[in-house]
Amino acid sequence: MELQHVLDRTAHLIASRGTQSESTILEALSAAARTLCPGAAEALVDWDGPEIARLRAFGIVHGALLRELSSVQHQVLARLHEAPATSLAA
């Protein structure tokens, strides 16, 4: 599974079901984006914060990861493969 596919699929899922439904993937994306956009990476997984802040953070993280696709693809995919299989199934 390519990172771009994961990002696109995640965007569609959180648009229809909210960020909480994809928390495992968002945690992996946040960890991968921490050096690229630390504020957005933190907001992405701030489960006590408002949903709109996580959605905005996802947009920022999504763009940053796509720009850095080649350098972080393996890191994110490795984290996603460590996640329980049920979190990747839709």
Image (cartoon, rainbow, N blue to C red):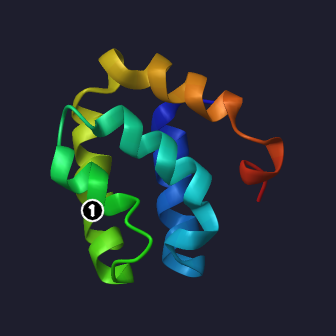
Q: Is residue 65 placed above or below 78 in the rendered structure?
A: below
**Splitting the image into 4 quarters, where does residue 38 fall?**
top left
Q: Which residue is mark 1?
A: 57
Q: Is residue 78 placed above or below 13 in the rendered structure?
A: above
Out of 81 and 38, give the one closest to the viewer: 38
- Dot 1 falls on a residue whose secondary structure is helix
Residue beneath the point at 53% across and 77% down: 18
Residue beneath the point at 50% across and 40% down: 28
Residue beneath the point at 54% across and 43% down: 6
Quadrant of image for the C terminus: bottom right
Out of 58 and 11, give the one closest to the viewer: 58
Residue beneath the point at 49% across and 48% down: 27
Residue 43 on image: x %, y %: 28, 62
Q: Is residue 23 placed above or below 80 in the rendered structure?
A: below
89 horizontally vs 6: left or right: right
Residue 7 on image: x %, y %: 46, 47
Residue 20 on image: x %, y %: 56, 71
Quadrant of image for the N terminus: top right
Label 1 environment density (alpha carbons within 10 Å; few <14, some 14–19, many ≥20): many
4 horizontally vs 88: left or right: left
26 horizontally vs 82: left or right: left
Mark 1: which amino acid? Answer: Ala
Residue 21 on image: x %, y %: 63, 69
Q: Say how many tags the image has.
A: 1
